[in-house]
Amino acid sequence: MNNKTTGAENIRWDLTHLYSDASVLKDDLNDLDSLAQTFNQRWIGKIGTLTASQLNKAIIQYEDLQERIGRASTYAYLNWSTATNDSQRGALLQYVREATTQIRTRLIFFEVEWLKVEDAYAEKMINDPALNKYKHYLERERLFKDYTLSESEETIMAEMHVTGRSAWMRYFSETMSQMRFNLRGENLTQEHLLARLYTHDRELRKEASESFTQQLIEKQHSLTFIFNTLLADKASNDRIRGLTHWLQTRNLGNEIADETADALIHAVTNRYDLSVRFYQLKGKILGLTPLHDYDRYAPIDESDSYYSWDDACSITIESYGDFHPVLAEVAERFFTEQWIHAPVQEGKQGGAFSHGAVPSVHPYVLVNYTARARDVQTLAHELGHGVHQFLSRGQGYLQASTPLTTAETASVFGEMLTFQRILAHESVPNNRLALLIGKIDDTMATVFRQVSMNRFENAVHTARREEGELSAETFGDVWMATQSEMFSDSVKLTEQYRHWWSYIPHFLHTPGYVYAYAFGELLVLALYARYLEFPEEFPDLYIELMQAGGSDWPHSLVERLGLNLQDPDFWDQGLGAVEQLIEEAETIYNAYQSD
């Protein structure tokens, strides 16, 4: 595969859909600053005294300003993300962050004043027909009323974010994207190196793991300092706002009760036996008992599968189209209208994401395509996000986005559609087994590994607040302890693996995010079961769910499809589906062994 082209080498997004060039962006920011001043002069000090009609007018103006800020921020970030080693792009990103922060400080009063109004007034406005379009936005914001500071204090916090948290996150991203890894005479990016963990060659997997670890060790001082700084930053922010525990702000943002998050985490950790059972099965199939950490993603089929970019496009669009034509129509636009950046290249940010941009434009998807089967699933995942973000545009900037928990619904569902289509066309038992093992591999990573990482986060946030700055050794000890609980004796964790906490960006960019992956995966397994039960009615209801965006509480939106997120036993449904996948793989393997 190393010498093959993927077909994705020239698949690059067109950012002129946002701005024709940086000079136009800067002109727009100057105009925005003037408009923000006018907005401030018109409405400051008046929220809480307005009629519903007046408040609606103010929100419309506020939403327009926020969308234009988002447009500028999107351009600068996406422009930088494909060349983080370009100093000019980095400078533009910082310029936009500083400029938009200044503009936002003129707008802070609006939400602060809304959160400070009396409950009776807020209730009256929320339920007034004139404000029906923004009903959920208004009620959602009130979740933070007890944790919001004064306008002047919020302004200071926003200003400090630019040279504090935001700067450290950028430094982390640039540090990771600039790393190069030596492996068998090649100088590889992170994406290309980690792809070697999915090869059949065990010695190559081991060498790739060692190479990756060596770079993490060389950067250990910087990475440990970044982690400590951002853990302390969050602790300070939470303390100033009166938040009682490290995950509270993420739960509020996800619009779920602490009890719901706790129930999910408890349900998953209580079924770590499924993780152990799966990796024991995989070890038997591979003839490796136990597996080592660098064996977890080893394929079980006889040869590496190769999927060109055109293959990946066709598989994804056809999978989406089998479910509903709207999904296929929107997904196809990402390919034909240059909304995707696909090649692996020097300085490009690792991983993959879909950026929702702003409703007046369209989402953008970034992947690092290396023509593996896993890349097809990743593309399907990110396009699921992208289609969701596109379909929810009608809700407007303030309500188009969903909480992180339900934001994963469309992406994981897209993966499921792709997997089921490939599986349905495969009749050879050994090939079906390979597909099932690959799918369960992903489920283990999405459900059990993400919750085990939540346990790591919980431990280090707690320790940083109670004990002070943590050493690299302490981070490593906590990482090994929380990961070992998931694997037990089914996977042998090497000493090298103790350093692998330090490369995971979600811990820094979005503290508390990781449980949302498990939330989304288990929710999708339950949704897919509903689809199989009601194949005629479900697809249209699903499209309506996507179009709703963040216009209602997550549990209310999902309830329309017949599921109850507030039932403590809900998560057992998804975990039961995981167990069924493992049982099917065991059945095929046992039959194959007896032949």
Image (cartoon, rainbow, N blue to C red):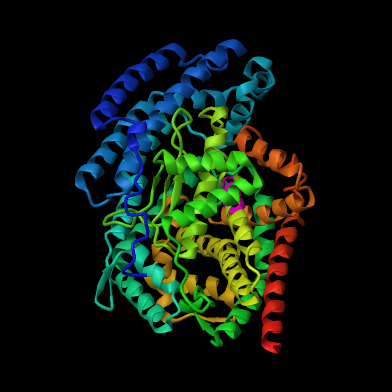
- Residue 524 is situated, as x and y percent measured from the top left of the image, at 66, 53
Does residue 31 appear to the left or right of 149 in the view shown? Answer: left
Camera-nearest residue between 180 and 306: 306
**Residue drawn at 48 percent across, 24 percent down:** 63
**Residue drawn at 44 percent across, 28 percent down:** 67
- Residue 326 is situated, as x and y percent measured from the top left of the image, at 60, 38
- Residue 284 is situated, as x and y percent measured from the top left of the image, at 60, 85
- Give above or below for 478 relative to 102: below
On whether residue 273 falls in the magenta region, the answer is no
- Residue 455 is situated, as x and y percent measured from the top left of the image, at 56, 64
- Give above or below for 443 relative to 88: below
**Residue drawn at 45 percent across, 42 percent down:** 334
Q: Which residues are magenta?
A: 407-413
For the stretch drawn in magenta, the main secondary structure is helix
Q: Quadrant of the C terminus?
A: bottom right
Q: Quadrant of the N terminus?
A: bottom left
Q: Quadrant of residue 207?
A: bottom left
Give the farthest residue toward the left.
Answer: 87
Camera-nearest residue between 254 and 333: 333
- Give above or below for 297 relative to 393: below
Whether residue 363 is visible, yes or no, is yes
**Residue drawn at 55 percent across, 47 percent down:** 384
Does residue 308 appear to the left or right of 80 in the view shown? Answer: right
Q: How many marks?
A: 0
Camera-nearest residue between 213 and 355: 355
Whether residue 101 is visible, yes or no, is no
Camera-nearest residue between 416 and 241: 416
